[in-house]
Amino acid sequence: MDPTPIDCFLAVADAGNVTCAARRCGLSQPALSRALLPLERGARGPLFVRRRNDIRLTEAGLRLLASLRRAAPSEPALPVTQPG
């Protein structure tokens, strides 16, 4: 089953890194970025500030994350694994 845009968003928010999130989702980095586009269009702006080694949530990203966590607080969309 392919990950949804929300799965991808949560993976990036949890990992703080596109490479790790893409691996978690079973996607390439470009495919993960494309999967996020519908959410960013809906938010009318970026959900993340992309930096060289990490990603930070924007205000819109923080609002979306809070909304998603309230909707399903105990059920992660994808398994969360610890690096290393």
Image (cartoon, grey):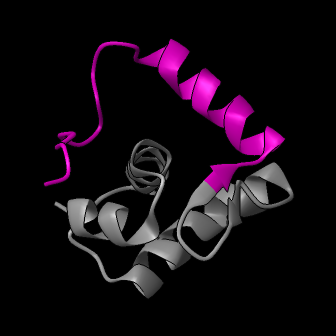
Q: Position of residue 48 (x, y in %)?
A: 68, 57
The residue shown at (16%, 60%) is 1
Is residue 2 visible in the rendered structure shown here?
A: no
Magenta range is 56-84
- Horizontal side, residue 37 vs residue 18: left or right: right
When asked about the image quadrant of residue 55, the answer is bottom right
Q: In the image shown, does 64 or 4 lie closer to the viewer?
A: 64
- Horizontal side, residue 83 vs residue 34: left or right: left
- Horizontal side, residue 45 vs residue 2: left or right: right
The residue shown at (30%, 58%) is 3
Answer whether residue 81 is magenta in the image.
yes
The residue shown at (20%, 70%) is 26
Q: In the image shown, does 7 or 1 lie closer to the viewer?
A: 7
Q: How many marks?
A: 0
The residue shown at (44%, 68%) is 18
Q: In the image shown, does 58 or 4 lie closer to the viewer?
A: 58
Answer whether residue 74 is magenta in the image.
yes
Q: Position of residue 54 (x, y in %)?
A: 55, 63
